[in-house]
Amino acid sequence: MQNIASNLETLEHRIAVACKAAGRARDSVTLIAVSKTKPAADVHAAAALGLTQFGENYLDEALVKIQTSADLDLTWHYIGRIQSNKTKDIAASFDWVHTVDREKVARRLNEQCPATKQLQVLIQVNIDADPAKGGVMREAVPTLLREIQQLPRLVLRGLMTILAADSDPGASYQSMAQLFADLEPQLDPSARAHWDTLSMGMTGDLEQAISNGATHIRIGTALFGTRG
Ligand SMILES: *Cc1c(COP(=O)(O)O)cnc(C)c1O
């Protein structure tokens, strides 16, 4: 197993430096530990170090980890592609869904969300217009946003993006921040109060994400080591 404790120390230093450079408070950035492909033992080790937010891409392996850490009071973020026949399990087991990119998925998550909770959701934006990536094109975001804010069991919190391999992170994250700001006045007043989340930044580009206003960074490799 990787030394998660020392990885976290190094990572926290990077985050602190980036926050300082951006004139931001450390607590304005939430670290999501992306544990995909890693064993439940790694989740437990990271939780023992104080991490509470975890991200997963693949439903089947996620469900095992969520079940085996049910006593830990962790918050789970779904960050993978959504097949519409998997929305029921996603709605039942996760607290957040970062990758909502079409109306059908939003409607199904809303219908299948257990009565005991609401789902915190983000619209995934394909900011680089990369055919290989999921997410809605920038121009289509306002329409999807209007649809989602009508759905009572979903709380629309903001935007998420995954960059193209050849992206310029500084420019793309700046575009995301601009879009996030431009959309706020288009929200219903009741939805505006919850519009507070910009999920962007991974191991390779967390500094650019933080300098452009990311509120949630999703970190796998820097914490758990390379994936096999
Ligand atoms: C794997 C993954 C991450 C973490 O990537 P690292 O480069 O390992 O930090 C973040 N977000 C999404 C959507 C991912 O699939």
Image (spheres, rainbow, N blue to C red):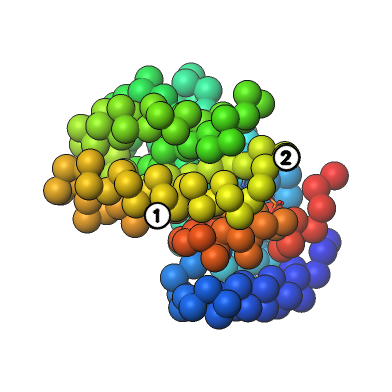
Quarter-of-image position of residue 211? bottom right
| Viewer-side residue, 65 vs 141 | 141
Q: How would you rate the neighbour count of disc 1 (Cα within 10 Å): few for under 14, some for 14-19, many for 20 or more?
A: many
Amino acid at the residue labelled 1 = Thr
Q: Position of residue 146 (x, y in %)?
A: 25, 32
Residue drawn at the location 73% of the way across and 40% of the way down:
166
Residue wearing tag 2: 166
**Residue 90, above or below 40:** above
* Quarter of the figure with the C terminus: top right
Amino acid at the residue labelled 2 = Asp
Residue drawn at the location 14% of the way across and 48% of the way down:
189
Residue wearing tag 1: 197
Q: Is the residue under label 2 in contact with that under label 1 (CB below 8 Å)? A: no
Residue drawn at the location 83% of the way across and 61% of the way down:
1
Quarter-of-image position of residue 4? bottom right
Question: What element does badge 1 sit on?
Answer: strand
Q: Is residue 103 visible?
A: yes
Q: Position of residue 205 (x, y in %)?
A: 67, 57
Quarter-of-image position of residue 32? bottom right
The answer to whether 227 appears left or right of 104 in the picture is right
Q: How would you rate the neighbour count of disc 2 (Cα within 10 Å): few for under 14, some for 14-19, many for 20 or more?
A: few
Query: Upstream in the sequence, badge 1 or badge 2?
Result: 2
